[in-house]
Image: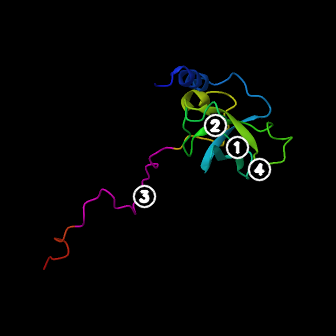
Amino acid sequence: MARPKRRFLATAQETSSPPAALDDNHAIARVRMAEGKNLYLVDLPSNAKPLLVELPSRFRSQIWIKRGGYVLVDTAVFVDRDNKLDGEIINVIREEKEWRKQSYWPSEFVKKSTYPEDSDDEDSIVGKMPPSDDSDGQN
């Protein structure tokens, strides 16, 4: 018998809209890579050192996180423990366009264009016709 979709739909609804404001110990982070078994390496906009964060059980097998995606991290969860974890994912940012409109979105995480800027360099020969041989072979 199939599992009910209530849990999945509730989780999806919870992650679709951004909060009005972030707490002091919450931060938006970019996912660098999956470390395996629900652990992810993320980059905070202010830190040079990546953080190892855990995906809570309510998101496991419900929402998938891809590299380069964004998550909301609580960095104060594991402060009192002695372990390698630096925080916990409390929200997965799925509707990135809505989150970017918020005032707390870090300026370091600017949206990069998929296509490079058009440059007017004369050195580029892309899209130009090859030189004709008529000018070289005139006698």
Camera-near label (2 vs 4) is 4
Q: Nearer the viewer, residue 36 or 107?
A: 36
Type of amino acid under label 2: Val
Give the structural element (helix, strand or loop) at label 4: loop
Camera-near label (2 vs 1) is 1
Residue displayed at 57% across by 25% down: 16
Camera-near label (3 vs 1) is 1
Reply yes or no: does residue 123 show up in magenta: yes
Give the structural element (helix, strand or loop) at label 2: strand
Camera-near label (3 vs 2) is 2
How packed mark 3 is, by other alpha carbons closer than 10 Å (few <14, some 14-19, many 20 or more), is few
Give the structural element (helix, strand or loop) at label 3: loop
Task: Choose the circle earlier in sequence order: 3 or 1.
Answer: 1
Type of amino acid under label 3: Asp
Residue 126 position within the rendered picture, expressed as x and y whole percent measured from the top left: 33, 58
> Mark 2 = which residue?
71
Task: Choose the circle earlier in sequence order: 3 or 4.
Answer: 4
Residues shaded magenta: 113-131
Camera-near label (3 vs 4) is 4
